[in-house]
Image: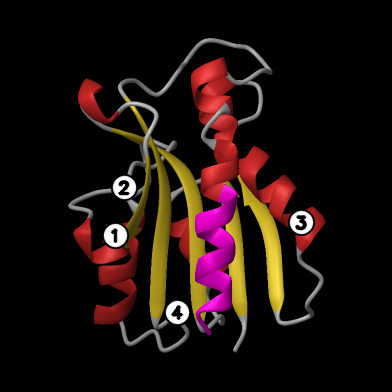
Amino acid sequence: MKIIVLGVGNLILGDDGVGVHVANEIRKQVNDPDIIIDEAITGGMNLLDLIKGYDKAVIIDAVKSDIKEHGKVKRIPIGYFNTMHSCNPHDVSLTEAIELAKKMGEKKIPKEIIIIGIMMKQIPCEFGENLSDEIKATVPKAVEMTLNEINKR
């Protein structure tokens, strides 16, 4: 089974880069040619292109949530998202891209797409290379959840 693990986010936007930080930690622990660990600073159609051809995709990203969930890490099947933001205003969300691709007959979409979401009350837009202490504390849990997803094959 071919799996792609994608850490999504921008490292120069503080907590938004948490997905990339998690992917970098996983990269230190996984050495399997059937598991690709990568990072992306994109969404929508571009993200779909990155996951095509794999049996399973695990996407790690900051997810906007209400204040009560801030700092939690959740496993979210892609079907539970009404939308998943794209960083390009001229693009579509990942869920919209997947639906469009299916309607067009695309056969290379992973059978399983799981989001490891780090819940945040607000996705940061300010420049900064470091994670806040609260979000930095979520990294080990997100790594553990991602490794569990990889081992489910």
The three-letter code of the residue at mark 3 reads Arg
In the rendered image, residue 139, in percent from the top left (x then y), is placed at 58, 38
> How are the residues colored?
secondary structure
Label located before the other in sequence (3 or 1) = 3
Disc 2 is placed on an element classified as: loop
According to the picture, the residue beneath numbered tag 1 turns out to be: 95
Residue segment shown in magenta: 143-153
The three-letter code of the residue at mark 1 reads Thr
Of 46 and 150, the residue lying toward us: 150
**Marks 2,1: beta carbons within 8 A:** yes
Disc 4 is placed on an element classified as: loop
Label located before the other in sequence (4 or 1) = 1
Count of labels in the image: 4
Disc 3 is placed on an element classified as: helix
According to the picture, the residue beneath numbered tag 3 turns out to be: 27
Left or right: 48 in relation to 128: left
**Residue sitting at x 78%, y 77%:** 32
The three-letter code of the residue at mark 2 reads Met
According to the picture, the residue beneath numbered tag 4 turns out to be: 110
Label located before the other in sequence (3 or 2) = 3
Label located before the other in sequence (4 or 2) = 2
Spatial distance from mark 2 to mark 1, Cα to Cα?
6 Å
Residue 52 inside the magenta-drawn segment: no
In the rendered image, residue 142, in percent from the top left (x then y), is placed at 52, 47
Identify whether 99 is placed above or below 122.
below
Q: Which mark is residue 73?
A: none
In the rendered image, residue 69, in percent from the top left (x then y), is placed at 27, 31
Spatial distance from mark 3 to mark 4, Cα to Cα?
21 Å
**Marks 4,2: beta carbons within 8 A:** no
Q: Residues within 10 Å of mark 1 (few under 14, many from 20)?
A: many
Q: Which mark is residue 84?
A: 2
